[in-house]
Image (cartoon, rainbow, N blue to C red):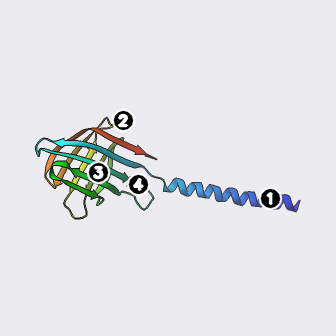
Amino acid sequence: MKKALLALAVLTVAAAAAFGIVSRADAASSEQIIFSGTGFSPSAGVPFGFWIWCQSGESSTPYAGQCSGAMYFYSLHITKHVDDVVEVQEPADGEYLMTVASSDGSVRCTLENDPPPTSGPSNTVHVSCKSPVSFTDGLSTNAVVTATGPG
């Protein structure tokens, strides 16, 4: 009888610990958004590319609302790491708006997809930049837009 009670107590503690771990993991999960593609600005005559990962601002992780990645401007021979996120938002379901900048301020751009995201390199992302060159008509029609995790 004592062994059965001890076994029951051990199983109860183990179950409580397991459920506690699951609850913490669920609380720490978050939506991650990835933009990857190439495009062109007709007004600036500049081809560009991007690969940027962001985490939703509603996340409970230390990376909430942060982005990291790169913007590149082929004809200007500029590739810059961007992580100085001003904001990442979801104005509508499946629509993501991220504003990123390099730490030295030489690159500062905003990217926004047309919702909803589709599978593969078939998404449209509108890009506007204040630097290294100013434009508001950047367009990528071959972008991969991925959103994972709780939304």
Say which residue appears at 79% left-offset and 57% top-offset.
Answer: 8
Residue depicted at x 13% and y 51%: 134
SS at badge 3: strand
Give the SS element for disc 4.
loop
Seen in the picture, residue 147 relative to 122 is either above or below; the reply is below
Reading the image, the residue beneath label 2 is 118
The residue identified by callout 4 is 58
Nearest to the observer: residue 91 or residue 17? 17
Q: Quadrant of residue 112?
A: top left
The amino acid type found where label 3 is placed reads Met
Determine whether the residue tagged by mark 2 lies in a helix, strand or loop: loop
Mark 4 to mark 3 CA distance (whole Å): 14 Å
How far apart are labels 3 and 1 at the CA level? 53 Å
Q: Quarter of the image containing the N terminus?
A: bottom right
Instruction: Kindly identify which residue carries mark 3.
Output: 98
Three-letter code, disc 2:
Thr
Provide residue 27's location: percent of width, then percent of height.
51, 55
Outermost residue, right side:
1
Q: Residue at x 55, y 58 (%)?
A: 24
Percent x, y of residue 135:
14, 48
Q: CA distance from mark 2 to mark 1?
A: 51 Å
Q: Nearer the viewer, residue 22 or 108?
A: 108
